[in-house]
Image (cartoon, rainbow, N blue to C red):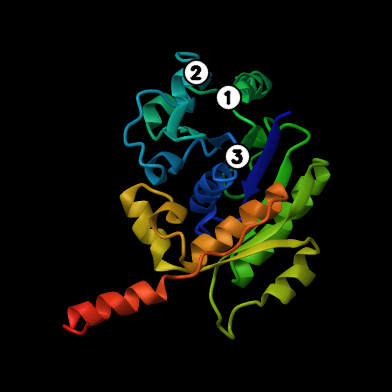
Amino acid sequence: MSRFIALASGKGGVGRTSLTFNLGVAMSLFNEKIVMLDFDLVMANMDIIAGLLNPEATLHDVLVRDKSIEDCIYEINQGVNVVPTGIHFETLKNINPNYISWNKIMSEVSQYGDTFLMDLPAGINSNVFEGIPRDTEIILVTNSTMPAVADTLKLKIFFKEFNLKISGFVLNMWYDDKFLLSANEIKSILEVPMLGCIPYDREMERSMALGKSVVEINPSSPISNAIMQLAAGLLGKYYKPIEPDKKGIIKRLKKFVGLP
């Protein structure tokens, strides 16, 4: 049975797309067959993060009825598929949001995986929300700033009106700062469970530049362990954090300075 998970944020810039991509790769490491769909029809960038530069067919082509879903599913890792949206505004002009058959699209894509991660556009877009299956689990993504949390609260209220299930929120790009809201303060504001706390880590930027997931580039980094723990929690699996190879680091340092 297909499982649909949508990651949503009240505003842009909170790392929702990069989290969606890395979470998908992390879930695949637990032997899940993952399909990631970029639902941002205007400012999509899942293709860039996934290392898909200028894909031949995208969701835009499906929406203007030039291509089928089969044409725009790309396997980037074993067990990981991505449906990019496209960035060409000329194609976007020919898409009529009132005539998008989201139910047909989701029905067609459901045969390609077990778990489907949907990267929703920031803010409130009712045309896209109409395409979300009714049993979709919503994960709110925010950082610790007051504007981000305020917009996340608005989004939570909006989803409630659509009778969509909110599983909880992920505190993303977290770092300790007295001027930012704490995890407990955010929990009290949103009144939904915190599913994970993903620390800010420059390793994420390095992995995006390489078109790879951070869990592949540096599996022992704090951010990789946090994302893997989030994936394990969503799948009901056990995950033991990978510790950095300190002995190996010491050995390389000794060799560098000429010590045995």
Q: Residue at x 65, y 60 (%)?
A: 170
Query: Which quadrant, please, contains the N terminus?
Result: top right
Q: Which residue is mark 2?
A: 70
Mark 2 neighbour density, 10 Å: few (under 14) some (14–19) many (20 or more):
few
Q: Is residue 56 left or right of residue 175?
A: left
In 3D space, how far apart are the residues under numbered discs 1 and 3 (Cα atoms)? Answer: 14 Å
Q: Which residue is mark 3?
A: 118
* Picture coordinates of residue 138, whole percent (x, y): 71, 47
**N-terminal-most mark, 1 or 3:** 1
Which label was assigned to residue 198?
none
The reply to whether callout 2 and callout 1 are in contact (CB within 8 Å) is no
In 3D space, how far apart are the residues under numbered discs 2 and 3 (Cα atoms)? Answer: 17 Å
9 is higher (above) or lower (below) than 76: below
* Picture coordinates of residue 30, whole percent (x, y): 60, 45
Q: Residue at x 32, y 79 (%)?
A: 250
In 3D space, how far apart are the residues under numbered discs 2 and 1 (Cα atoms)? Answer: 9 Å
Q: Which residue is mark 1?
A: 112
